[in-house]
Amino acid sequence: MKENIGIGLAGFGTVGAGVFDVLQHQRDLLAERSGFQFEVRSIVVRDLKKVRDVAAPSELFTTSWRNLLKDPEIKIVVELLGGTTDAFEFIKAAIESGRIVVTGNKALLAEHGEEIFALAKKHDVPIFYEAAVAGGIPIIQSVRDAFVGNRIESIHGILNGTSNYILSHMQEAGPDYRAALAEATELGYAEADPTLDLNGGDVAHKAIILAALAYGFWVKPEAVRVHGIQEVTATDVFFARDFGYVIKLLATIRAAADHSIEVTVAPTLVSKNSVLASVNGAFNAIAVKGDLVGEALFYGKGAGRKPTASSVVGDLVEAAFALESPARHVGFSSHSLYGASKAPQDVHACYYLRVAVDDQPGVLAKIATIFGEAGIGIASVIQPKAKDKNKTDLVFMTHEAAYGKMSNALEKIKNLSCVKSTPVLFNVESV
Amino acid sequence: MKENIGIGLAGFGTVGAGVFDVLQHQRDLLAERSGFQFEVRSIVVRDLKKVRDVAAPSELFTTSWRNLLKDPEIKIVVELLGGTTDAFEFIKAAIESGRIVVTGNKALLAEHGEEIFALAKKHDVPIFYEAAVAGGIPIIQSVRDAFVGNRIESIHGILNGTSNYILSHMQEAGPDYRAALAEATELGYAEADPTLDLNGGDVAHKAIILAALAYGFWVKPEAVRVHGIQEVTATDVFFARDFGYVIKLLATIRAAADHSIEVTVAPTLVSKNSVLASVNGAFNAIAVKGDLVGEALFYGKGAGRKPTASSVVGDLVEAAFALESPARHVGFSSHSLYGASKAPQDVHACYYLRVAVDDQPGVLAKIATIFGEAGIGIASVIQPKAKDKNKTDLVFMTHEAAYGKMSNALEKIKNLSCVKSTPVLFNVESV
């Protein structure tokens, strides 16, 4: 006999409809493997009249998550509403009513993770959120459970498929950022409003979740330096290549020797020989360095209906097991073995800096002087032949320096009369 | 208050001593993250007098696992004895006494998994075995738990660090197999007796475990075609390169359209552009193709004290949670959604075949005729300039054919008077 588990599904978009679909089509597989049969008893949508590409009985639909919570047969709720207002209210109410929660809402966890897990602990209700980071890649359970015995030294992640698609197309074909974006949108990788995909916001949410698992506390969003790919031009892609690098939108999560925690999201030059450099298209990859496991890498589709539904369904099975085992953790354990988060200005990195300058003698010296006075070492400089007779690009690769120091130097460089536009600054990581 | 969990450790070799070490050194980390404090109460060794590189109180040591099981405070046993005789007796006795088992014993599970999990189910005792496959890479929990909603189309794995170290060194430096092996032994990758590392036996054990998780039954060892790397010569490495391939010792686990299951371990040519081709040295990698998740790849250290201890300790935490949640699965769910295993002779593959022949006209035609009569299509042939005046190598890449058909053809080719030695046959996989 298979046990019947009542599910409430909040959200019926790309992922929500995918989950519903998988629960129907893989019914036997799931029952055989897990012993559970999942029954979706209620589906929350905003618009009852919208035409759906996955069919579901109309009597399941409701526009209010409050209705969903009224059904005592619903033991697990799946939150795929998105956003941080309604979804937040829903999750809190679900926890308070004793429902186990499965969610893919990275923004909500990044902004309110501390409060959500405190509430979950209070009510002894586990939260599952494998779908929140890197789609189908099981990075949450790997970092939290499999690597529980490891001190995590660093996590480097390519965590947004849209921006990676754009960057890898710029790398291969050299089109402009805007042309590649249009292409990505057409292929369905970019959201209708891809702002969070491109400005690093989406990656920052995921990075905060990974940092919480690795270091036991929730880094505040304002403590994360976030830069998107809007500033990356074909020019930079070519210069990076000259230096032997590829530009990726990279999340860097790292414990310093003093146990303070860095979370940075920035266009980052990685060696063309690194594994992360070869992660192309809409794929995600996460490199984890632990004191026991050494270097481990996870690679796969980071978004899309099926890969994300794969993670939600995996969580549903875990949630069903959790219904009968109240002792297991709620999904996140806070502890104070590490320090606070490092302020962005105190985070050290190597940098790539491109400055558009007047093509005249003495310009390099002026900039080098500013670096010298700031105590920032220059690793190499490229001064290519001028494209037009007045303007040229100067490209610097620096040694390690605090971002605050670098920002100050940048401000001074920007104010030089020979500098024609705001300099472009990316990170350089050896991963 | 942290909960104290009594552990019995059977085996104090590379991994066992590593586990003991980690439990001491990461005590606070584990306690904070999991809420458990692990106390090793007994250690089973063969020789009490042996000098150990990890210190443990002498009163913990015993030469009999029966003594270990007499301690009622030991709730979880860690089996790292190796082998399939004593370890088998120990695990059965542990299960029957209600102890949760953590093991890294791939040979034991591959040969007796069916019996062990049947016993575990009877006594409702879970078995954890993340350390049995690919060291620190969490591939067991990923395939079983994270991908529970997926139909697994295939798994391709580089699962033995020693053989991969040898092959990648032959690839780079071109030394002979024996020279590379000596190097690997010196670096501590190869066992004192590396037979199972090299002849594919170790990989076959791991492949059988992965197949069980993906397809719900235990493929019998005799149903697995196993070839090791002993036949791979520098000549083959160079020919493969000419065709655009790299030779890897690959486990291929796959469901056919008729739901029959293939498990093959063989030196396999993979495209030099594939991710698996770039897995070098003592690393492991596993590519999983699921109908939902698409292509996922896991990469990391597949052996060694710390990476393997990482997995054992991860399992210990899971085991400690399991002490309080009897409902969770025992670690493997058998089901009959897939058919039986496919007999090796019925498994289809593309092949690389090298034949040492007399350097005279008509030889190619004779071999091509045998292929033609067997219905095996030739994709390409290389006939390099003869190295000595009498003998040359002929290299064929074939289209897909059943292994049985290929073996028969091979037998006929071997018996041709112009063929000088046993032909070399490897698989070709597009991964």
Image (cartoon, coloured by chain):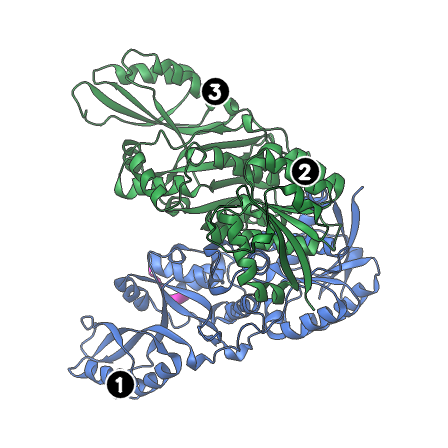
Chain colours: A blue, B green
Q: Say if the magenta span includes residue B125.
A: no
Mark positioned earlier in the residue sequence (2 or 3): 2
Provide residue B327's location: percent of width, then percent of height: 76, 50
Q: Nearer the viewer, mark 2 or mark 3?
A: 2
- Quick check: can you spot residue B280? yes
**Which of the two residues, A340 or B100, is positioned nearer the viewer here?**
B100
Cα–Cα span, label 3 and label 1:
73 Å
- Disc 2 and disc 3 in contact, CB within 8 angstroms: no
**Principal SS element in the magenta part?**
loop
Percent x, y of residue B311? 55, 52
Q: Tag 3, which secondary structure? A: helix
Q: Are marks 3 and 1 in contact (CB under 8 Å)?
A: no
Q: Are marks 1 and 2 in contact (CB under 8 Å)?
A: no
Q: What stretch is highlighted in magenta?
A: A174-178
The chain that hosts pointer 1 is: A
Which residue type does callout 2 highlight?
Lys
Q: As drawn, is A337 to the left or to the right of B407?
A: right
Residue located beneath label 1 in the image: A370
Q: Which of the image's four quarters has the N terminus of chain B? A: bottom right
Marker disc for residue A165: none
Residue A430, given in percent of the width and then of the height, sits at 36, 64
The correct choice, above or below, for A197 with respect to B119 in the image is below
Element class at badge 1: helix
At which x and y percent is residue B103? 59, 45
Q: Which of A301 and B177 is in front in this view?
A: B177
**Residue that numbered label 3 is attached to:** B404
Please tell me in which quadrant of the rendered image residue B160 appears: top left
